[in-house]
Image (tube, grey):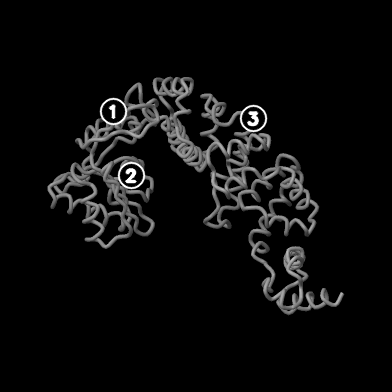
Amino acid sequence: MLSGLTSAERKIIQGISALAAKRGERAYIVGGFARDILLGLPNLDIDCVVEGDACGLAGELSTELGVGNISLNKKFNTAKITTGDLTIDIASAREEKYTEAGALPTVRLSTIRQDAMRRDFSINALYISIRPRDFGKLCSERCRLEDLKKGVIRVFHDKSFEDDPTRIFRALRFAARFGFRIEPRTRRLLQKAIKDGMLEKISPFRAKREIMFLLGEINAPEAVKMARALGLTKKILPGVKKNAVRDMETGRVIWLDFFIYLGGSFSPALYMLLILLKDIPLSARRKFAQDLNFGKKENAVISFPGKKINKILRGIIRNDPVWRVEADSLRDEQLLYTVLLSASKYPAEFAKTEKRVMDYILHLKRKKPFHSSSELMRMGFPAETLGALTKEITGGRRGGEILSKSQEYGFLVRKLQK
């Protein structure tokens, strides 16, 4: 299974193996990386645990291999190295103790067996030796491998969700991602944690991060379906309708039609969040964004008035050229959300709406005025008129009336002569 890794991954792992042996330390592949190796899935985040000094090992690795940027957290004895598309996380084997629910743990160095017990679920507590003498040996309890084979999400102890309530989100995320089931005891503990108010112990930053991780999954609709069944959505998103899961499934199909044309800044999680909030009043959406401390740009998307979206949608359906300019105020996530709205509100117009939005993203969105604001002012246009003028020029560029800078110049001259 290790031979199926990329050459870059093998080089890193062999480097860690050799350095750890030289330092007299035992090193292992662990966590999600070990899990995905056993599932035959790709993973660009290499997780390693060393019985020893992770920060020292990472520093030597970075120097010896000449790889990327390194950041150290000496409080938790962890290190992160980034090189190309790869992220390498190296941690010292440790035990963790939680003083209160949702708090960061206190840690102390320990063995790999104790380190495995601090992990969230049994499927993430597998470890593979990369010591030269037993390289590639699976050194884990058989029951954890059985859980992985049978597709079972299982916590290690009754206070797992109390120690770290973000595990509630992660249980749903892994279950949806792999098509696994949450075993009965773990499900009962999860529901008890929700009922006991453990979600309120999570900081806004961590809650937002976990929600967006969950919604960023390709199987996000399945995760939300489970969240509804467990009563989680009532706690974090009151007012989410039952048809939200169906809308998300439709939204996923739309995203798959578009995704190869979208830029790297497109956020599937933000797109799915818009769908999830579709039937929630604007005031509630604004409160949700405020409570979770969303950034300025995300907040603007979440709080964008539905009336404006609907106006643009009607313009698309009528093929009114103005919509191509008004759409400049939208991010791609909102454009795809507009396509989704057409599927539910105007199903007979869905195909035309999808095609027009796709044409806009592919061919029209980048068509800006040829002349800059400074050029327009040098021609004699007052500064206070530039906004409306730029909008008019953009409409001509998008509508095909202005195809070159010379045509745009002629248009401007005629404007001045009037």
Tell me if label 1 and label 3 are in contact, CB under 8 Å: no
Q: Real-space Cα distance between discs 1 and 2?
A: 18 Å
Q: Quadrant of residue 27?
A: top left
Q: Position of residue 15 (x, y in %)?
A: 22, 55
As shown in the figure, which amino acid type bears the numbered disc 1?
A: Cys
SS for tag 2? helix
Closer to us: 330 or 130:
330
Q: Is residue 53 left or right of residue 251?
A: left
As shown in the figure, which amino acid type bears the numbered disc 3?
A: Lys
Q: Which residue is mark 3?
A: 241
- Disc number lying in front (1 or 3): 3
Residue 33 — which label? 2
Closer to us: 285 or 48:
285
Q: Please, is residue 159 above or below residue 29 in the view?
A: above
Q: Which residue is mark 1?
A: 143
Residue located at (60% from left, 38% from top)? 248
Q: Is residue 417 left or right of residue 338?
A: right
Going from N to C along the chain, the mark reached first, 1 or 3, is: 1
Residue located at (64% from left, 43% from top)? 303
Residue 15 — which label? none
Figure quadrant of the C terminus:
bottom right
Mark 1 residue crowding within 10 angstroms, few (<14) / some (14–19) / many (20+): few
Q: Real-space Cα distance between discs 2 and 3?
A: 36 Å
- Disc number lying in front (2 or 3): 3
As shown in the figure, which amino acid type bears the numbered disc 2?
A: Phe
Closer to us: 74 or 196:
74
Mark 2 residue crowding within 10 angstroms, few (<14) / some (14–19) / many (20+): many
